[in-house]
Image (cartoon, coloured by chain):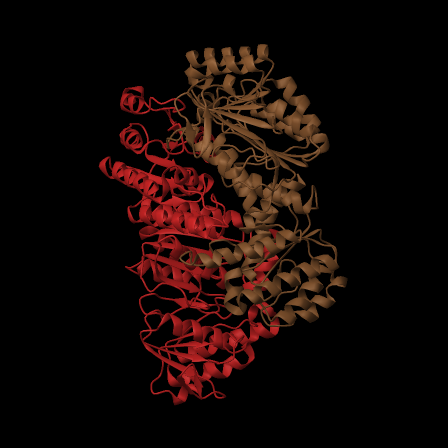
Chain colours: A red, B brown
Amino acid sequence: MVDARSLAVIGASGTPGKFGNFFTRSQLKMGYDGALYLVNPKEREIMGLPVYPDLLSLPEPPDLVYVTIPAARSIDILRECARVGVKGVVMIAAGFSESGREGAALEEEAVRIAREGGFRIIGPNCFGIYNPATGLTMLPGHDFSRTPGDTGFISQSGGFGVHLVRQAQSLGISCSSAFSYGNAADVDESDLLEYFAMDDDTRTVAGYIEGVRRGDAFERSLRLAASSKDVVLWKVGRSTSSQRAVTSHTGSLAGSHDIWDGLMRQCGVIQAKGVDQVLDTVLALKHLGRRPGRRLLIAGGGGGLGTYGADVAESLGLDVPAIPECSMAGLRSALARAGAVPGNPLDFGAPLIPLSEFREAMEAAAGLEGYDLMVFDIAANFAFDLAGEEGLKTAMDILVTAKERHSRKMAVVMYTRSFDPGDPSKEAMVGRMRGLLHEKGIPVFPSVERALKAIALINA
Amino acid sequence: MVDARSLAVIGASGTPGKFGNFFTRSQLKMGYDGALYLVNPKEREIMGLPVYPDLLSLPEPPDLVYVTIPAARSIDILRECARVGVKGVVMIAAGFSESGREGAALEEEAVRIAREGGFRIIGPNCFGIYNPATGLTMLPGHDFSRTPGDTGFISQSGGFGVHLVRQAQSLGISCSSAFSYGNAADVDESDLLEYFAMDDDTRTVAGYIEGVRRGDAFERSLRLAASSKDVVLWKVGRSTSSQRAVTSHTGSLAGSHDIWDGLMRQCGVIQAKGVDQVLDTVLALKHLGRRPGRRLLIAGGGGGLGTYGADVAESLGLDVPAIPECSMAGLRSALARAGAVPGNPLDFGAPLIPLSEFREAMEAAAGLEGYDLMVFDIAANFAFDLAGEEGLKTAMDILVTAKERHSRKMAVVMYTRSFDPGDPSKEAMVGRMRGLLHEKGIPVFPSVERALKAIALINA
């Protein structure tokens, strides 16, 4: 469905506040490479485009249909879909199996029509599909990028699906596709994992899952996907109240989490929790790969950074080993200044020492033996006060050069909100520095906790 | 020392890159209410101000002296301080007990001079004191607020001290005073806790501590402080590598953390970790008070939010109780729309439903029985797409009205970075919404994890 060459929007509308309006605006703003047909018997023209009264009036049978009208009226539309011979349908509206017996009957009927009509359904109760290559988008992804990437997302929640894509984008992570699949009446998590397992454009799969429909199929698909891709899953429904919510949200059964945990371990799937942690993990995988090693050199311009970093690292099962004395001579001579502590954690002695000194010390640090990965915590607000944006940029260049010369893996901590947020220009500058480092294969995290948690997860 | 009416800066300098320049610029930009004297035998004028060759040449003995010159040369200055009769000295430079035997001897000598000279020392190896009422500031707090508040900060790390104050400010939390106290050669954590215990302007004390000098005195001061204030402490040095770092950072001994944990529990002190968690806790205390109750109503416009929120809440020992059916009628009638799930978690059915409907539902939710605290997760990016800033503002007003009418405690989750960060105007708008809610006693957290962790901590 992601490569549909024509798309019909049932319930397209010029009236703000309706899903059909919201989606049409999003899809038009995104720009769709194929033929886009708007369908609504009550409207003639929307945003300058002609509107067709029904599917049968379209110049061609569309590959894909987004149904944005309420649940009760959508069954007739599905019959029309079967009649004209579409390949796939995305059903946005809620009011199906998640809402009780009546809705469940509607959902069963929808699936029956799809099976007989030879098409697949995504949803209902979902936000749709995002595919940057074709310009297909999910509700309300009007500002999603058109740059294709190698991370595939699946999300049973539409809201989290959009969050994942949007924040991934802000971290320089592009998608192959993203699916919000809601009630999973037809296409479910197993189908989607299988799809991504076979998709050559996808290297990492990340997903939010409330419950699993077909246990055996899921296990098969997951093993298949995890054998060739990195898989990061965020499973909810672990607590009593959450299980209650899962049922009323997408009509799923959350299942036993012991069985779940065992399966994840066996398959080598990374379990993360929350939008931030999922994306931190995807970011870490992108730049550091799977299992880069647990021995960290924790460095920064200040003693507190390393002291606390070491605490957090060890609580997460990471190591902050003492560095073999034989490799320390260069660092000791580069960091003779008062306040500096050449060791692990490594304290440069001030938030930003003079840049020539910083270059020498960073080169020496990158050349040390006995660790796998350097975590450098730059206090961007201090460094900016001392050296301005140019100085900060030079410091970043020094990091990148040291990393490349010594073929080191490196992660950087750069706090957001470390400046007075009354001045958004500073936050924008942090964004530029982050972009510069991401381009050079150095992931940037907004706190030491988040950096280290992600590093622990990719080593699991 | 915080109310010093005159301040001398030893080592004030016009040369960028030196601590004495950095501090002078910060202090001048902040504006100091008392008399400010710059001292440096090699300079005549700095930033338009006259420079004195030494302490003896000043028109009056200064109450407080900031010593910004290197360790070795500072002992002579302390002798001068004793001679002219100052009340307090802040020693910025490192190179004392944290750096080995030679530095330790210097530090002992410094303390001896202070004892004999009748003055106290903050530091060495610290960033100083911030007091908004007088305009005294720490390095490099040039942009700290002049509005006094009721939170006192102590931090053994200068960097974390500045982070805490700056981010507190961004959350609408003002300080009574903040101390970066470094090596604690003379004034230590016990003295500072005792000071805040007796300070009528302080209601909450938050601190970063690496190690404790005087166990008995610390226990006494902590009990005293915790008997009349809320105390939040962040203790590092729990792991082997971190203990190694603590010693080389501020020359402290981290101590046994079992004893520490026991003492904290006995005194009712909240233990938090990391800048973010400390400030989330202070923010929660400010608006929700200590022990507001563990029974949460988790509400939001989307099923995933509540489902995940319930998981996180229960994992933290919070409750998400089913709401007594007898109080549900109003909510059920207000939320008849497809996709909405009146219950706990409470799903409004869409990120922002029409505002009249939202008002009715929020009023009904605030009136429900059986919970202590509502946590409302607003997907600001979706809501903005649907209703713009005006709509978002109206939604906030509806929240505030419902809270006030029903005398409810409420916390809001509003994700930062939920918009494309290429557009800082959106982040600024989130900041405005946050400010509006903080004014009305509703704390705003950047993720559901952080909100719930803070709520769990203030209930501990």
B192 vs A374, left or right, is right
Q: Nearer the viewer, residue A262 or A19?
A: A19
The answer to whether one can see residue B343 in this image is no
Depth check: B365 or B140 in front?
A: B140
Quadrant occupied by the N terminus of chain B? top right
Up/down of A45 relative to B176, above or below:
below
Residue B382 position, x and y percent, is: 51, 64
Furthest residue to the right? B326
Is residue B383 among the parts visible in the rendering?
yes
Report which quarter residue B390 is drawn in.
bottom right
The part of the image, by quadrant, that contains residue B134 is: top right
Count of numbered badges drawn on the protein: 0
Q: Position of residue B315 (x, y in %)?
A: 58, 45
Instruction: Name the residue nearer the viewer: B314 or A8.
Output: A8
Q: In this rendering, is residue A288 above or below A107?
A: above
**How far across and how far down the image is residue A134, in percent?**
32, 70
Q: Nearer the viewer, residue B119 or A372?
A: B119
Identified at 64% across, 67% down, the residue is B358
Quadrant showing the C terminus of chain B: top right
As drawn, B455 above or below B359? above
Residue at image position (37%, 24%) is A343
Q: Position of residue A204 (x, y in %)?
A: 35, 53
Q: Is residue B323 left or right of residue B16?
A: right
